[in-house]
Image (cartoon, rainbow, N blue to C red):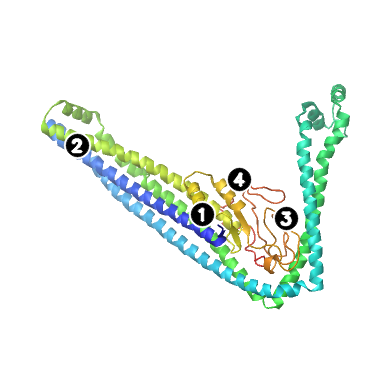
Amino acid sequence: MSIRGPEALASLDEAMRDIRREEEDIAKRLARSSEKLGKIRENEAELFRQLAQLRLDPTIQAELDGRISTAEAKARDMLKAHAKELSTAEKAVGDVDAALARLTAERTEALKSFEGHQGELKALATRLGPTIAREPGFAGKRQAASEMAEIAAQSMRKTEQAEADREQKGKPYRDDALFMYLWEAGYGTASYRANNFIRFLDSKVADLIGFAKARPNFAMLNEIPLRLREHAERQIENAALAEEELDTLETEAIDNAGGKPMREAMATAQARIDALDAEIVATEDRRDEATRTVGQLSQGGNPAVEGALGELAAALGREDIQTLLAEARLTRTGQDDTIVAQIDDARARSKEEAGETRELNERLKTLAARRRELEDIQWEFKKQRFDDPRSTFRDDKLVGDVLNDFLRGGISAASYWDQWRRSQNWSAGTSDWGGGVGLPNNGRQRSNSPWPNGGGSTMNWPDNSFGGGGKSKPRGPSGGGFGGGWGGGSSSGGGFSRPRTGSTGTRKHGGFKTGGGF
């Protein structure tokens, strides 16, 4: 079952909200744990005071009580200040979350506006399509563009075959250490430089391995793909120019029929979406910083608090106090035994609380890493315009089982993103009112045409192979290590291109497809 781009992005947004909610919940649990640990320490201190009253003379008892009370009071004051600081940090995170919710909602509305104008343009293009397709001028240019597209496709196929041959047939040459030594030295060419003794030795090696006959063959294996690629790129450029001429005719026909306001409205909605995306990135980075602050405070990351609790712990761990406890264990009095049991219980609870805190800290680190990875994926998703209303995904498990697998750490972010890429398609197909030739390009197609189903020139261009008259084309994977294009299979690695703090936070290329291919 397939899923549309906007709904897919909404599912990722919901997953992001779940991660943030869990981060917030764990931060609060850590804060409670820190507070609880402080109270356990205070209770332990009070128990030692009671034990001292039973076993020590008043002078020593007063000295011990004074040390404990000083450390205890300092810890209590610092914990109170820490709680206030933590509350302020948590409020900052809440404010940023509210801002993100508002921005996401505004983006959803802007995307709906874009889709509405897109639908109006589609309806107009559907009505005009058959008429304009029969016009001789347009039909002739469409035929020429289709022929050029086929030539470009054939040229690229030959190039890819030559490059494959270079890799396969060139391997025996590259594996021959003597041959590669002479080749890299430029032996047999004007670039060869060596003294007479080395020339003599090299000539013997060349005769031994038949270098004179092998070198031209290897040179040709390397040269042919380069020349074929240059030729193919010229054909692509020619076909692109022919397509742009079709674009111009199509756009003029749409504008003359009243479509210009629709296109301009789509452009306005797109500009709003881009602005919101930039603001979302900046706000996410602010949240990341605020979350880090809350995490540090929740974990007792305030140095003053750590020092205060450390002093109390040190006071309770002094040798004389440990001696007092040891002596109390050796005697069998009811009061001693009760207090000692309570001290043991307090220390056990303190150890248990510390263990749970470590587990929560690890979970918080995992969530923060997963959140950043999901932010990266959402960024790529938007950058590739996969949230365009005409973008679809064959596998709805990407927002179900596969998403859960990613969130649990079962698959990497790169692998999860690659599955999105391989599942994605544009809803447009080939023309239903005129022929056309498609260039192979990982299932992506020309779609800046204002005509339904891509018009009469449904060419599939390689990623970023050319620009087009100021109009945006659908972008396949580009940037961030997620290449595509001619002969490119799916990619499962590479870095993500989402800008982080200190970057402008804006996208690097055009907007949604503003024309047909609906």
Image depth: mark 3 or mark 4 in front: 4
- 291 horizontally vs 197: left or right: left
Sort mark 3 into few (<14), some (14-19) or many (20+) by Cα contacts within 10 Å: few
According to the image, label 4 marks what residue? 492
The residue to which callout 1 is attached is 399
Give the position of the C terminus as an image quadrant.
bottom right
Q: CA distance from mark 3 to mark 4?
A: 22 Å
| Residue positioned 34% across, 38% down in the render | 355
Q: Residue at x 80, y 67 (%)?
A: 141
Q: Earlier in the sequence, mark 2 or mark 3?
A: 2
What separation in Å lies between label 4 and label 1 (alpha carbons)? Answer: 19 Å
Tag 3: residue type? Answer: Ser
* Res. 240 in view: yes
The correct choice, above or below, for 327 with respect to 62 in the image is above
Disc 2 is placed on an element classified as helix
Q: Is residue 189 left or right of residue 57?
A: right
Q: Quadrant of residue 39?
A: top left
Among numbered discs 2 and 1, the one appearing first in the sequence? 2
Q: Quadrant of residue 189?
A: top right
In terms of sequence position, does the residue under pointer 3 or pointer 4 come before the other? 3
Q: Secondary structure at mark 1?
A: helix
- What mark, if any, has residue 342 been given in the picture? 2
Q: Amino acid at mark 4?
A: Ser
Dot in front, 3 or 1? 1
Mark closer to the observer (2, 3): 3
Pointer 1: residues within 10 angstroms few (<14), some, or many (20+)?
some
Q: Nearer the viewer, residue 447 or 294?
A: 447
Residue 293 image position (x, y, % from top left): 41, 49
Which residue does the numbered mark 3 point to in the structure image? 465
